[in-house]
Amino acid sequence: MNPNYKNWVPNGMIAALSAGTALLGAGTAALLCTKMNTTAKKLLAGTTGLGAAFCGGMLGWSVYAHGKFSYNGQRQLSKQIVEGTAEYITLPEGGVGLDVGCGSGALTIACAKRNPQGRMVGIDRWGAEYASFSKKLCEKNAAAEGADNTEFHQGDACKLNFDDETFDAVTSNYVYHNIAGVNKQQLLRETLRVLKKGGTFAIHDIMSKARYGDMMQFTNELYDEGYERVQLIDTTTGKFMTRKEAALLMLGGSALLIGKK
Ligand SMILES: C[S@@+](CC[C@H](N)C(=O)[O-])C[C@H]1O[C@@H](n2cnc3c(N)ncnc32)[C@H](O)[C@@H]1O
């Protein structure tokens, strides 16, 4: 049995965009074929035509991004990012790590495989927007990878259901930018809350200023509080992707925040 980590651009999204493009395109063509020559017809045809063009554009982008992210494709960008982030997670003997927003379990499992001396916990809210990800899928993937040092639970990144300083390491990949209306630095703080003193963290996300505010100031604050080796690594200058690729995939501003509490 092989693992199936699915895709950050779900097949369902591509199917919905294909259907939308086809329906709006057909509607526009049907309107243009009618003999009426009214302003209302022109307006309606213009609107459906624009809708079809927008859906078609989104469809083109989704197919492109799906190919880049695919675990079976040539580029395998998701795999590169997951494995590149997992490299920063080291657990002590018997230690436990947390992956926030584990999705299909890829990063949890990658960390668990690198740390057979410890154990990884993956949590996710598994909501409707990523309907192909689930706890069951994570467990199936862990079994397929032989990673029996993993466990998965429903949870919310905004309010983690763990006491302060529970984990020896914390990680996360492309989760917080999805959470609308919540201060992203507060989300980082919530993740760091459950990290033990001396534990390590590696958090990858789209940390653009518009989303996260001043991250240099945030890293300085961490240093002031006694955190060590805090680094904000731009992952769009060759580490995980090029600037051009990041821009095309709408991943501009991607960065990895690493360090020790
Ligand atoms: C792009 S996927 C990334 C999944 C995984 N980290 C990976 O690298 O493959 C984003 C994930 O964040 C999860 N997510 C979004 N909001 C969340 C929240 N408030 N709490 C926990 N998980 C959340 C989604 O359910 C989804 O699985």
Image (spheres, helix red, strand yellow):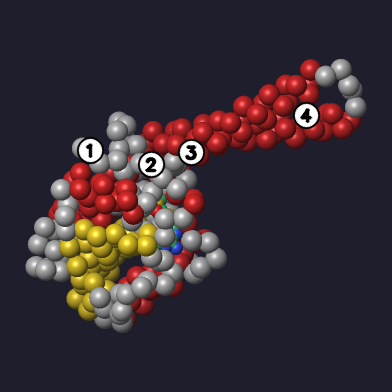
In the picture, which quadrant includes the C terminus? Answer: bottom left
Which residue lies under the disc numbered 2? 7
Residue displayed at 35% across by 41% down: 6
Q: Mark 2 to mark 1: distance in Å?
A: 15 Å
Viewer-side residue, 204 vs 149:
149
**In the displayed structure image, the side of residue 42 where residue 109 appears, left or right:** left
Viewer-side residue, 103 vs 174:
103
Mark 4 surroundings: few (<14), some (14-19) or many (≥20) residues within 10 A? many
In the picture, which quadrant includes the N terminus? Answer: top left
Q: Is residue 17 visible?
A: yes
Q: Please, is residue 24 above or below residue 189 in the view?
A: above
**In the displayed structure image, the side of residue 115 where residue 82 appears, left or right:** right
Which residue lies under the disc numbered 4? 45
Residue type marked 2: Asn
Q: Earlier in the sequence, mark 2 or mark 3?
A: 2
Q: Position of residue 230 (x, y in %)?
A: 27, 69
Q: Mark 2 to mark 4: distance in Å?
A: 35 Å
Which residue lies under the disc numbered 3? 12
Q: Earlier in the sequence, mark 3 or mark 4?
A: 3
Q: Please, is residue 58 above or below residue 103 in the view?
A: above
Q: Position of residue 258 (x, y in %)?
A: 27, 64
Q: Earlier in the sequence, mark 2 or mark 4?
A: 2
